[in-house]
Amino acid sequence: MAYEHILGHTRPIAQLERARQTGRVAHAYLFHGPAGVGKERVALAFATALNCAGPEPRPCGACDPCGKIARGVHPDVRLLACEAEQVRRGLVEAGKTAPSSQIKIEQLDEQSGFFRHAPYAGRTKVLVVVDAERMNLHCQNRFLKTLEEPSADTLIVLVSAQPEALLPTIRSRCQALAFGPLPRELLAQHLHQARELPLERARVVAAMAQGSLGQALALAEEGYLEERDQLVQGLGQALEGDLADALEVAGAIGEGREARERLETSLGLLELWLRDVMLCGLGVNPGQWVNQDRAEELGRAAARVDPARLLGWLDRIREVRASLKSNANPRMAMESLLLAMRMVSA
Ligand SMILES: [Zn+2]
C-alpha cells in the first residue's frame, strides 16, 4: 500500500511522514474519524513506509517488505480485529455460532509474543487495531498495560470511528490524528475513474455517501440510483394513484426477504429526496442537493408540494424509522407511512 493509492488525507499523511523522517514516530497513534474514509489504509501505508527497504520516498511499493505487507504476510505487521470482522474479510471461516463483534482479551494475549520478540526484519513492528472501540473493557484494561510499557521497536495504531468508547487513559497515551470525511468531488472523481460511473451519477453517489469511500463503493455496487428512481416513481404512484396503488408500493418495499434492511435504505433515500425537494423549493444552490442528476423532477415536485407539507412527511418518516427499531412489521410500517403521507397531502 503506497500513499498514492490513498484518497485525500494529505494532512495526517504529511504529519506521519515528518515524524518518520525526523525519527520522532510516537509509540502509539489513534486514527479517528468517520468509518470508510481510509484510516486503516493510511495505517498500513505508514507501516509499509517504516519497513520499506527501497529508496525514499517510501514506501517504494517494489521491495520485498512492501510486497509482503501488501499481501498481508509480513511477520512484523499485524492487524487485530474482532472475529466478525475477520469473517467479513474472509480471513477466517464462520463457525457454528455467530462470530463475536468484540475484540477479546484472549486475542490480545495471543499478541504477547509479537510484543516481546525483536522484529524479524530488524525494523519496526506495527500492530493495527481495527475498530479499536470493539475491545471490551477487560481487553482495554490489558491493552493499557501494553501502552504503559512501550517498546522502542513497536508501533501501535488504534483505528476507530468511535474513539469516545475507548478509555480516556488509553486515548491520553496515544497521539491522536483526525481523519475527516472525504470531499464530495474527490469521491465523485474517484468513482468516475475507478468504477467508470458517469460523472453526474458519480456525484449523486458521492453526495449520498457523506464522505466515506467505503460507503460510496458499496452504494455504486448496489445500484442505489436505480433503487432511488424506482422509489421516487413508486412514491408518485402511491400519493397520486388510488389506495390500491399505495398498498402495492408498500408491499413491494415491505415484503419478502431482507424487507427490514430494504425499508431502512428506502426511508434513507426518501428522506434525502424530500430534503432536496425542500432545498429546491427554497431556492438553495443545486450544489447542496444530493440528487443533482434529477434537477428537473425535483423542480416539478417543489412546485407542487409546499414546505410545510414536506416537513410533515419528513416527520412521518422519522416516526416510521423509530417504529422499525422497536420491531414493527416492515410492510405495515410502509403502509402506514404512505397512508399518512396521503392524508398529509390531502
Ligand atoms: Zn519498499
Image (cartoon, rainbow, N blue to C red):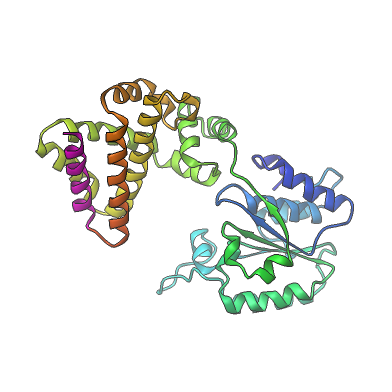
Q: In the shown orientation, is residue 131 left or right of residue 310?
A: right
**In the depicted structure, whether residue 65 falls above or below residue 267:** below
**In the depicted structure, whether residue 308 falls above or below residue 179:** above
Q: Residue furthest front?
A: 308
Residue at horizontal 36%, vertical 31%? Answer: 278
Query: Residue 72 or 40: which is nearer the viewer?
Result: 40
- In this rendering, the count of numbered labels is 0
Residue at horizontal 42%, vertical 25%? Answer: 293
Q: Return the x and y of residue 286 as percentages of the image width and height.
A: 46, 24
**In the depicted structure, whether residue 228 falls above or below residue 48:** above
**In the depicted structure, whether residue 164 falls above or below residue 196:** below
Q: Is residue 17 something that shows in the picture?
A: yes
For residue 27, which quarter of the picture?
bottom right
As for residue 148 lying within the magenta part, the answer is no
- Which quadrant is home to the C terminus? top left
For residue 344, which quarter of the picture?
top left
Residue at horizontal 28%, vertical 36%? Answer: 231
Q: In the shown orientation, is residue 304 left or right of residue 109?
A: left
Q: Return the x and y of residue 83 as percentages of the image width and height.
A: 52, 69
Judged by its main secondary structure, the magenta piece is: helix
Q: Return the x and y of residue 159 as percentages of the image width and height.
A: 63, 59
Q: Return the x and y of residue 109 as percentages of the image width and height.
A: 65, 79
Residue at horizontal 26%, vertical 54%? Answer: 257
Q: Residue furthest right?
A: 22
Q: Is residue 63 something that shows in the picture?
A: no
As for residue 333 lying within the magenta part, the answer is yes
**Where are the magenta residues, as a range?**
329-346
